[in-house]
């Protein structure tokens, strides 16, 4: 039984008009990671762009993805790195006794 995979490339100029950049089928039972490798070979690339979305036809039939989710997953902002909030350190955060230091070490599994 052939498995059909649909893909959306973030750099596709037709993304405003079409939901998918293309599709391909494979007769082998492959995982999503293996499907990405097959797609890269099909497109003649070493690697796919990070925001490339590859979805099996079975996932689409199950209703796992909506059109808005598909478009959001491949947008440039989808995987933008987020900066962690810096927590201000104060003198009150420092343990004041040996017992507190031991408790902190135990809490983090270091003692």
Image: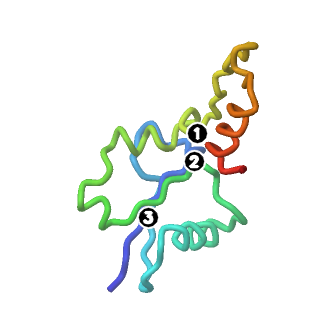
Q: Quadrant of residue 79?
A: top right
- Calculate the distance from the C-alpha at mark 1 to the C-alpha at mark 3: 23 Å
In the depicted structure, whether residue 26 falls above or below residue 50: below
Q: Which residue is mark 1?
A: 79
Which residue does the image show at 42% across and 52% down from the upper left?
20
Which residue does the image show at 60% across and 70% down from the upper left?
37
Q: Are marks 2 and 1 in contact (CB under 8 Å)?
A: yes
Res. 23 mark: 3
Indicate the quadrant containing the N terminus: top left, top right, bottom left or bottom right. bottom left
The percent position of residue 92, horizontal first and vertical second, equals 70, 14
Who is closer to the viewer here, 3 or 59? 59
The percent position of residue 36, horizontal first and vertical second, equals 56, 66
User: In the image, is 103 to the left or to the right of 21?
Assistant: right
Q: Secondary structure at mark 1?
A: loop
Q: Quadrant of residue 26?
A: bottom left
Who is closer to the viewer here, 7 or 29? 29
Please tell me how crowded label 1 is: few (under 14), some (14-19), or many (20+) other residues with Cα within 10 Å: few
The percent position of residue 40, horizontal first and vertical second, equals 62, 66
Q: Secondary structure at mark 3?
A: strand
Q: Which residue is mark 2?
A: 51
Q: Closer to the observer: label 2 or label 1?
A: 1
- Calculate the distance from the C-alpha at mark 3 to the C-alpha at mark 2: 16 Å
The percent position of residue 43, horizontal first and vertical second, equals 62, 65
Please tell me how crowded label 2 is: few (under 14), some (14-19), or many (20+) other residues with Cα within 10 Å: some
């Amino acid at each position: 039984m052939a498995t059909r995979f649909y893909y959306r490339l973030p750099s596709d100029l037709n993304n405003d008009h079409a939901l998918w950049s293309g599709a391909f089928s494979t007769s082998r039972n492959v995982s999503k990671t293996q499907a990405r490798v097959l797609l890269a070979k099909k497109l003649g690339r070493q690697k796919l762009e990070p925001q490339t979305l590859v979805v099996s036809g079975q996932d689409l039939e199950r209703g796992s993805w909506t059109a808005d989710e598909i478009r959001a997953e491949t947008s440039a902002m989808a995987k933008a790195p987020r900066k962690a909030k810096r927590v201000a350190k104060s003198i009150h955060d420092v343990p004041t006794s040996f017992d507190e230091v031991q408790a902190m070490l135990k809490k983090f599994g270091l003692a």
